[in-house]
Every structure is written in C-alpha cells, then in structure tokens.
Amino acid sequence: QKEVEQNSGPLSVPEGAIASLNCTYSDRVSQSFFWYRQYSGKSPELIMSIYSNGDKEDGRFTAQLNKASQYVSLLIRDSQPSDSATYLCAVNTNSGGYQKVTFGIGTKLQVIP
Amino acid sequence: EAQVTQNPRYLITVTGKKLTVTCSQNMNHEYMSWYRQDPGLGLRQIYYSMNVEVTDKGDVPEGYKVSRKEKRNFPLILESPSPNQTSLYFCASSLGGGIETQYFGPGTRLLVL
C-alpha cells in the first residue's frame, strides 16, 4: 500500500462547478497535510495546509481532514479554467524518527470552459 | 524576494559525465531537500538535509550525492549519470522538516543520453 494515494485522473469539471479532490494516507500518526498545485512543467506551489480535523477555508478552496478515516480532500468552488493543473497531496510521515513529507502522484484537474 | 533557485534549468548530457545541479535559498531555511519527478511516480525524495553538514538519504538516493557546507546551498551531484536518471528535479526548502510548508525551486530538466 502506498503511503499517500490519489486518483491520477484526469478529473474533468465544467467551469463554475465544484471540483473535489481526494487523498488517503496510511500513517495513522501523520499530523501535517498539504495540498500543492502544479502547472505543467512548473514547480509545486502550496495552496492549503491543514493540521486539525474538520474544514479549513481559504477563498474558493476548502481543505477537509478526517484523521479517523485517514482521508484529506480539497474542494475548489466556482472552478475556473485557470485551476486546470495537477494537485498534489502531501502528508508528513515518520521515517526512522525523522518527520518527512511524502507526496501522492497527483490528480490532474481539467476545468472545461 | 524569497526564493529557491536552481541551475541549470535544462541540461542534456551523456552517460558517465559528472554533473552538478546547484540549489540556493535566501530564506535562512534549515531544511532542504531534493526530489525527482517522473510520470506516474510523482515526487520522490532523493536526499534531504536538516542543517549544515547534516544530510541523509531519501527514498531514491542511488546514483546521487549531496553536500551541505553552507546553510543556503544544497547541490545535487551525479557522479556517473545514467539514462534512468533522466527526470525533472526539484530542490525545496522549509523552516523545519515534515511539518512545515516547502518552497520549491523552478526545476531542472535533465536528459541523459
């Protein structure tokens, strides 16, 4: 089982719709969860970080965390064509006593005008 | 401007010819890391450094070396590149380890013939 799992997509949504991106992780003691956006050929950039169970909202983005289910999601409201990118879920994991970040393979989002 | 820089951005080389990819950050971050990104495999950590003179292997260290003689610099060395090291490489830095947001450099696209 991979440490961080994401559906690679592509996930296609019409402009203005809500895009829902999902991620599951295997390390029960993970404490930090991140969503990065990556445009093709560019470097990842942070969208959201979340550390506690529940929802965290920032503009059109909402991150949701459920530690009991080991599940983290990202909702994008009023999706725009400029949101078309790959979204990487990242989770901190304990590796030999060191806290490292493990990335999922990313979900490609396509927003159709 | 706070940033992580990498050089070169693009590199074509031949098997066995030693090369170095430089990485520098101006944010006084203690933690730095190298990743490679391959289609279908996502971001995989090569090496990381917790501070000056402190480095350790990530998930895919074979064929790579690093050094951290100064806080701001973290070069990646390929002593004898092989075609399976053809990839997109990212350097990243953060204040701490797995619980902190990482800031990524622009990436280095390497082709080994």
Image: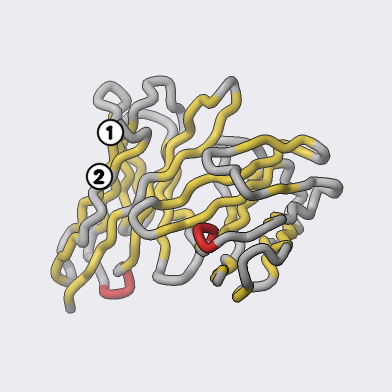
Dots 2 and 1 on the same chain:
yes
Which part of the image, by quadrant, shows the C terminus of chain A? bottom left
Labels 2 and 1 touching (C-beta < 8 A): yes
Disc on res. A71 = 1
Q: Residue furthest right?
A: B69
Q: Is residue B15 above or below residue B64?
A: below
Specify few, some or many for label 1: CA neighbours under 10 Å numbering under 14, 14-19, or 20 or more.
some
Residue sitting at x 67%, y 72%: B8
The quarter of the displayed image where residue B12 is located: bottom right
- The residue positioned 18% from the left and 58% from the top of the image is A18
| Chain of the residue under the numbered disc 1 shown in the image | A
Question: Of the residues under marks 2 and 1, which one precedes in the sequence?
Answer: 2
| Residue that appears at 85% across and 49% down | B70
A64 lies above or below B10: above
Tag 2: amino acid? Asn
Foreground: A78 or B14?
A: B14
Which element is circle 2 on? strand
On screen, residue B24 versus residue B48, left or right, reads right
Q: Which mark is residue A22?
A: 2
Residue at 70% across, 55% down: B76
Mark 2 belongs to which subunit? A
Q: Residues within 10 Å of mark 2 (few under 14, many from 20)?
A: some
